[in-house]
Amino acid sequence: MIKLDNVKKSYRMGDSIFEALKGISLTIEQGELVAIVGPSGSGKSTTMNILGLLDKPTSGKYYLDGMDTSKFLGDELSALRNKRLGFIFQQFFLLPKLSAIDNVMLPLTYRHEDKLSAKAMSDLAMAMLAKVHMEKFAHHRPTELSGGQQQRVAIARALIGKPSIIMADEPTGALDTKTTQQIMDLLTSQMEEIGATVVIITHSLEVAAQCHRAIHIRDGLLIDPEALEKKSH
Amino acid sequence: MKILPYIREAVVNIMSAKLRSFLAILGVLVGTGSVVALISSSQLATAHALAQFKSLGTNLLSVNIRDASYGKKSADSRNFQLSDTPRLQKSSSEIMLVAPYTIGFQSMYFGITNLNGQIIGATQTFGEIAKIHIDRGRFVSYLDAHNFFCVIGAKLADKISKAGQDPLFNQIRVGKEIFTVIGVMKPWPRNMFILADLNTSIVIPIQAASFLDKNTHITDILLRLVKHPNINLVEKQITAVMKTLLPKKKVSFNSPSQFIKLIAKSRQTYTMLLIAIGSISLVVGGIGVMNIMLVSVIERKREIGIRMAIGARQMDILRMFLIESIMLTLFGGFLGVVFGVFTSFVLALFSHWQFYLYGTPVILGFAVSVLVGIMSGFYPAWRASKLDPIETLNSA
């Protein structure tokens, strides 16, 4: 479960201060599939970074599974990301020098408590690759794979640590319509299987339409799209 | 903590940019290589020098007698006589054998073949102390006295054989006299201790030597001492006896242990110099590695960001780059050790030294390369670990 309580984020840019988030409060329940929608510069990437524990709010609180995340520092945040979060990126962000299976295994190698043996890790990664129908490509490098295949491997990597939340930043932004649908189907089926929450940052209204609900951000604030529509009429 | 996967990954990274990695380690290779080659060859040279004494034994002492004031020969200056030998023998209880000898030069001919060499006037004991082995015939003996007999060195024997003659029992013209060859020596390993090269010398009975040339005197005495002698004490005792026997002469001593000390001392300065040279090339090599690692960190910002996002701690990133840098220099160090040992092997081959593979330079080579890896890799690794994941993920 995710809870943001009046989260603000500002950046110092030279002499001026730029407010990226001007006070966002939201709650996302466990198992929800939520889209965060908004134009470029609206603050959705900042929201994603804060939700992904890559950045800290200037003020306000972020509760992840009931824990106040402001209390965590450095390596504790790394461990939290490793255990509770999975990331999927628009450009896949697989490590080019590692094979598909090694990429999938990577989060487990950074897990410092209950560390698995190399054999157990590779078995688990293989099982994960089978779930995304990529087991035949386990020993291929990312450059030998198509965009859709790379994103499947990236999904396997995001899921292997059994995260409670998956952060997906434009997961289908670099894919064609047909592949987009396949990836979305895969993502929804897999999240249901492990009961994870998925937060998708997207431009695409089609993708947003497949989510349980969409959260709209504009100029660092949440807006009610219906209210916006009424206003413009 | 499992280090193996890190090493595997580091090797994958190093191998994925072979040319760059090789160029980066070139400095370390040359640095380690020169340190290993120089230390190894210096050890080989020392071993070679020490081997000379091993065959002779270290319980030797040589005494050199010369005029107290150089150039001014006083008429009453008495020389050491063969008959003084028992007196010298009794000067110390640690003296086992005494062999006075003379060194002289005369023209020497076998037929028309010019035998360029020294004439050693010696006793039977000299052969024992200097470890002269006879190939054919026999060595000079006390019974030969004033007889014009000689034993010839291996190289001179070769010269005569090449002229188509058997030297044994043939005759050699020395100055105005004719000497009969009674023995041929086996090749004799030269050493710094007995200055004459016996391979190109003839050995004649010591009495015959003074007969051959009135100006030839006993200037050197070779002594074999007890197994573990107190050399300082023996030298003092001999000096005291010589003072009464030869008041106008000056006596100086040489012993293998002195030579060994001298070699060790010169090697120390030599080694310090080598370490200085090696350090400079290693510093330069280390800077090269640091440079490449800094470039690598910048190039792999995205990768660092991804790793941080999925849970790598700062320590994991630091370790990753540090291990990569150590693997890089270790690889250079390995090539350097191989290169260095090979160089010293070739050097030994050309210098006719016995080759040994010593542990010290090899271990030192590896240790130094790991140290360079840590020192030059730490700063880039630290910088990588301090990167901001958001910034690195957004970097191109």
Image: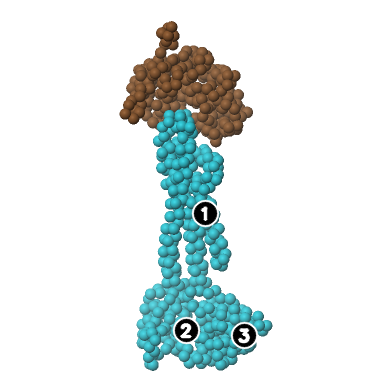
Q: Are marks 2 and 3 on the same chain?
A: yes
- Point 57% across, 31% down: residue: A142
Residue B192 in view here: yes
Chain A's colour? brown
Looking at the image, is A203 positioned above or below residue B139?
A: above
Label tally: 3
Is label 3 in a helix, a strand or a loop? strand
Which residue in the protein does label 3 denote?
Answer: B113
**Residue B210: where, in percent of width, then height?**
49, 90
Which residue in the protein does label 2 denote?
Answer: B100
* Residue B347 picture quarter: bottom right
Which mark's residue is nearer the viewer, 2 or 1?
1
Q: Chain of mark 3?
A: B
**Residue B54: where, in percent of width, then height?**
50, 70
Which residue in the protein does label 1 denote?
Answer: B337
Q: Are marks 2 and 1 on the same chain?
A: yes
Give the Cα separation between the discs numbered 2 and 1.
49 Å
* Residue B281 picture quarter: bottom left
Give the Cα separation between the discs numbered 2 and 3.
30 Å
Q: Is residue B160 left or right of residue A87?
A: right
